[in-house]
Amino acid sequence: MAIDISNLTPQQLDELIARASEAKRNLHKQRISDVRKKLIQLAKEEGYTIDELFGKGAKGSKGSVSAKYANPADPSQTWTGRGKRPNWFKNALAAGASEASLLVG
């Protein structure tokens, strides 16, 4: 497929480049999807799941972490101690509770 670009304006060239880049991204995504489907089918034919062969979780996943702190007013609200402190935790500390008093059981 030959495209004569010699008579295109800079704006037309930019548009062509943008459309070609989008087509390339879509082709890449489709090929990944096709390979993924083939792998899932092959694993299934052999009696396995993808999770059994490659493990669970997303790339870079570190797994789940147990709750370290619980809200005494509502024990269903928990926090692992990682990341941003939840509002209930900050409010409890402001009200005079200690971190140790908020530890899970």
Image (spheres, helix red, strand yellow):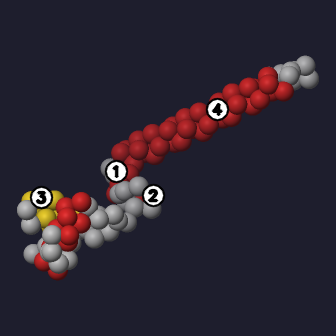
| Whether label 1 touches label 4, CB < 8 Å | no
Whichever of callouts 3 and 4 sits on the residue coming sooner in the sequence is: 4
Which residue in the rendered view is the most extreme toward the right?
Answer: 6
Task: Give the residue number, with chain letter if any, for mark 3.
Answer: 76
Q: Looking at the image, which residue is at 14% across and 75% down?
A: 97
Residue 44, compared with residue 79, is above or below; it is above
Amino acid at pointer 1: Thr
Residue 98 rendering spot, x and y as whole percentages: 17, 78
Q: Nearer the viewer, mark 1 or mark 4?
A: 4
Q: Which mark is residue 22?
A: 4
Compute the Cα span from label 1 to label 2. Answer: 17 Å
Residue 11 x %, y %: 79, 25
The residue type indicated by label 3 comes to: Ser
Residue that numbered label 1 is attached to: 49
Q: Secondary structure at mark 3?
A: strand
- As measured in the structure, the alpha-carbon distance from the residue carrying label 3 to the one carrying label 2 is 29 Å
Q: Earlier in the sequence, mark 2 or mark 4?
A: 4
Question: Any mark on residue 59, and which?
Answer: 2
